[in-house]
Amino acid sequence: SQTIHQWPATLVQPVGSPLSLECTVEGTSNPNLYWYRQAAGRGLQLLFYSVGIGQISSEVPQNLSASRPQDRQFILSSKKLLLSDSGFYLCAWSVAISGNTIYFGEGSWLTVV
Amino acid sequence: KQEVTQIPAALSVPEGENLVLNCSFTDSAIYNLQWFRQDPGKGLTSLLLIQSSQREQTSGRLNASLDKSSGRSTLYIAASQPGDSATYLCAVDRGSTLGRLYFGRGTQLTVWP
């Protein structure tokens, strides 16, 4: 069966520090991968998605970047965090076929202080 | 731009009641609509996916309907239980690459014994 792992689960980072959130998927090949953010008082927002290794699409301009160094690995990064980067970050995957559902990881809570 | 609205924002009911959660979207050109459940501080679990050609989907005590032309979906929960307490999120798929979802802000449901 397929599983998705996301870490760290919680982190508190000072403003201006770097960030790296990692996500890996097991049990499937060539998945579509996604990073979503859930900020306080706001709905879930798609940040990045990837349909293959090295292929990254950004949905909104922001202080973050994403990379996909391996087929089932997706990384969310920042060189210098802002207070507004605080939120709940969710990695997700789906099979690259229309009509199938999307599966989410357990999420990472980021607090920038 | 697609806007997804969920009503009510919060709902508190006694155990055993039948519930209706509403979702509306502004752009009817969707591929799929999904209902998710989110427990506090956790990731999302997919409950039901309705493809644009379908009118409804059922899973156990859950039934979701879709009226694409009017931009509305309804999640019906029969015989509610305390374990149903969670936030329920509606999301529409805006393109052929499944997973590029627009989310509503959710309905926070509390079912008390």
Image (cartoon, rainbow, N blue to C red):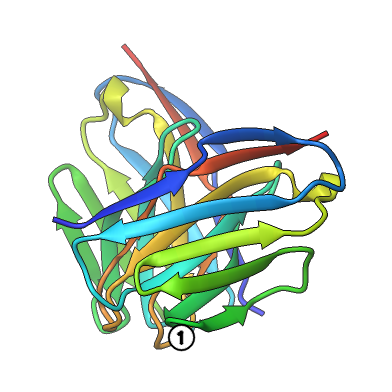
Q: Position of residue B31 (x, y in %)?
A: 38, 82
Q: Disc 1 on helix, strand or loop? A: loop
Q: Which residue is at the front of the view, A52 or B101?
A: A52
Locate the C terminus of chain B by quadrant: top left
Q: Tell me, yes or no, if residue B12 can be seen here.
A: yes
Q: Position of residue B55 (x, y in %)?
A: 25, 73
Residue found 80% across the figure and 46% down from its top: A17
Is A18 left, or right, of A69 in this rendering?
A: right
Residue found 28% across the figure and 25% down from its top: B83
- Check the image and name the residue furthest to the front: A69
Residue found 31% across the figure and 30% down from its top: B84
Q: Position of residue B94 (x, y in %)?
A: 49, 81
Q: Position of residue B98 (x, y in %)?
A: 38, 78
Is B17 left, or right, of A54 in this rendering?
A: left
Q: Which residue is mark 1?
A: B95
Locate the N terminus of chain B by quadrant: bottom right
Q: Which residue is at the front of the view, A33 or A75?
A: A75
Amino acid at dot 1: Gly
